[in-house]
Image (spheres, coloured by chain):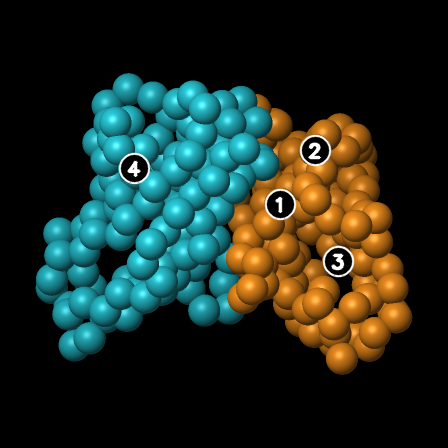
Amino acid sequence: AQSVTQPDIHITVSEGASLELRCNYSYGATPYLFWYVQSPGQGLQLLLKYFSGDTLVQGIKGFEAEFKRSQSSFNLRKPSVHWSDAAEYFCAVGAPGTASKLTFGTGTRLQVTL
Amino acid sequence: KAGVTQTPRYLIKTRGQQVTLSCSPISGHRSVSWYQQTPGQGLQFLFEYFSETQRNKGNFPGRFSGRQFSNSRSEMNVSTLELGDSALYLCASSLSPGANVLTFGAGSRLTVL
């Protein structure tokens, strides 16, 4: 069975500082990997996805993520955080071709201090 | 282009009642999936519909059901509500089951008293 671990429940960074959110997955083959963001009272917005190819993927809002097969990781990064990035971030894994059935991590809540 | 629309956005029910939630997918999207989000269990897959047929189902009791209409709109129903059913119910649509990218709606927040 597939699973996703986000070890950090809550992270606080200063505006302008860099950010890295960790995500580890368990899956038998190469999965489809996603990062979503959720603002309070809102649904999920897709930040970026990895299906195959270049292991460094670029997303919206200046985010990027790197797929590392050897570490079963898909960490999310941003060089300089803005106060508007404060939200909850979810990593998810899906089986190729049937990614409507996603398995999500428990999320990391990001707080940004001014 | 309109996004995924869920109605109602908020509702309050009492134990034992039933509830129906509605989801209109993005125009042209034919696959609709439902997720439950709670503080304790996180985001969990409920079911997926395509061409009016349920294709996948998560690990939820039979009180949770859904359907899809010919225009791809979907409804989910929860019967005999329990306190633990209080959650944000999220609908997501995609072009097809294998399209691999879900677009989520804002959700319907259900409170069971």
Mark 1–mark 2 contact, CB under 8 Å? yes
Residue A101 image point, x, y percent: 58, 36
| Mark 3 or mark 1, earlier in chain | 3
Residue picked out by circle 4: A73
Residue B57 appears in view: yes
Q: Secondary structure at mark 1?
A: strand
In the rendered view, tell whether residue A111 sits above or below residue A47: below
Residue picked out by circle 1: B45
Residue A84 appears in view: no
Q: Tell me the chain of label 3.
A: B
Real-space Cα separation, disc 2 to disc 3, in angstroms: 19 Å
> In which quarter of the view is residue A33 placed?
top left
- What mark, if any, has residue B56 been given in the picture? 2
For label 2, the crowd category at 10 Å Cα-Cα, with few meaning under 14, some 14 to 19 and many 20 or more, is: some
Q: Secondary structure at mark 4?
A: strand
- Looking at numbered disc 1 in the image, what kind of residue is underneath it? Phe
- Colour seen for chain B: orange
